Amino acid sequence: MATFKAIRIDKAEKGTTVALTQFDEAELMEGDVTVRVEWSTLNYKDGLAVTGKAPVVRRFPMIAGVDFAGIVEQSSNPQWKPGDKVICNGWGLGETHLGAYAEKARVKGDWLVRLPEGISAREAMAIGTAGYTAMLSVLALEKHGLTPASGPIIVTGAAGGVGSVAIAVLSKLGYHVIASTGRPSEADYLKGLGAAEIIDRSELSGPAKPLAKERWAGGIDSVGSTALANVLSMTKYCGAVAACGLAAGMDLPTSVAPFILRGVCLLGIDSVMCPIEQRKIAWSRLAMDLDHRKLADITHEIGLDQVIAAGAKILAGQVRGRIVVKIL
Ligand code: NDP
């Protein structure tokens, strides 16, 4: 019986169990491409899955992990051949389809993106779903028409994964970036990434006024709840805010005032089912617009055996930047 190492989640009488164990290759799900996984990463959603804190996993047994980079081992899909270097994220990996924290993955070839020239598999996973979501958010702001000349951009959850990559990319593109963080001790880190100003998250944590003083042309928000409500109420006329996360909560206690009195747009960002063409654009822009040195500065490497403990830390807001997971 062929087996491989994997982080397996099973349903228990109460909640779920999680363990690093051997997984039977015969249990792999349907798919026309088998990939030797080299690198994965730890996202907020992975934290929810491995701790069982939210019902992210919807099929058992499950292999956790929502994204990987690796090398095609076998393929009956004409787009891919053995040896091709690929990235996969979202599409239900680690939720409804066996995921990334494993030496092997079998997926649909249509889910894969070719590793862009100029970035390694390790760098791709240092970026991971969080960094790719940051880029989807930047693309949405650009599509709305924002440029560095429009005014400052606020990034909430600044020291987290989405926030760190968003700051690095926006500053490289020439934006004046305002970083909102609850960790003042990370000020030097955020400035190193390119933040021009740092504000304490408490400025965005009280009940939002319908409209407040206009402070920024746009924002990338990975926090949700009152933070997003305050960001909207402080966004300039005809500005836009990309909403991609819920680190502080799923609610949005706002009013229609920013939309109907200032023409502010709220742009929804979903990374999971994002169409493949948009993914290719995001990954190629990441290869161009993210400084390799800054990416290295925000990246911390762990092994598969450290993922479960790190999952609890990310939920506690104790992870800075990105965690890359070495699989092989
Ligand atoms: P991280 O945990 O790395 O970052 C989240 C950051 O949010 C923290 O570092 C912290 O930043 C801030 N934060 C945490 N808790 C609170 C709180 N209670 N109140 C205010 N701020 C808080 O997670 P990621 O960056 O990986 O993900 C961020 C969010 O984006 C998550 O909700 C995740 O589910 C979502 N996401 C959504 C995707 C999509 O497809 N739409 C894809 C990827 C992620 P600081 O310490 O600087 O204040």
Image (spheres, rainbow, N blue to C red):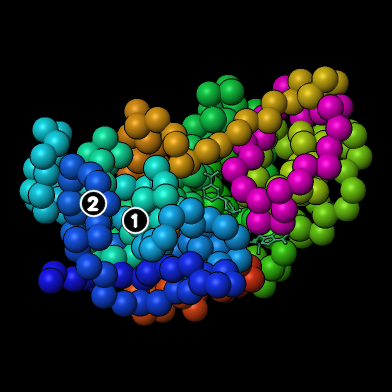
Percent across and percent down for residue 240 are 67, 30
Q: Nearer the viewer, residue 293 or 280?
A: 280
Find numbered disc 2 in the image and state the secondary structure of the residue it sits on.
strand
Label 2 – label 1 distance at C-alpha: 8 Å
Q: Position of residue 99 (x, y in %)?
A: 35, 57
Quadrant in the picture for residue 10: bottom left
Amino acid residing under circle 1: Leu
Is 262 in front, or is 5? 5
Q: Quadrant of residue 113?
A: top left
The disc placed on residue 106 is 2
Relative image position of residue 20 (x, y in whole percent): 35, 77
User: Quick check: is the Cβ at mark 1 less than 8 Å away from ligand 1?
Assistant: no
Q: Residues within 10 Å of mark 2 (few under 14, many from 20)?
A: many
Which residue of the protein is positioned furthest toward the front in this rendering? 13
The disc, 2 or 1, on the residue closer to the chain's N-terminal end is 1
On the rendered image, what quadrant is the C terminus found in?
A: bottom left
Give percent across and percent down for residue 69: 27, 55
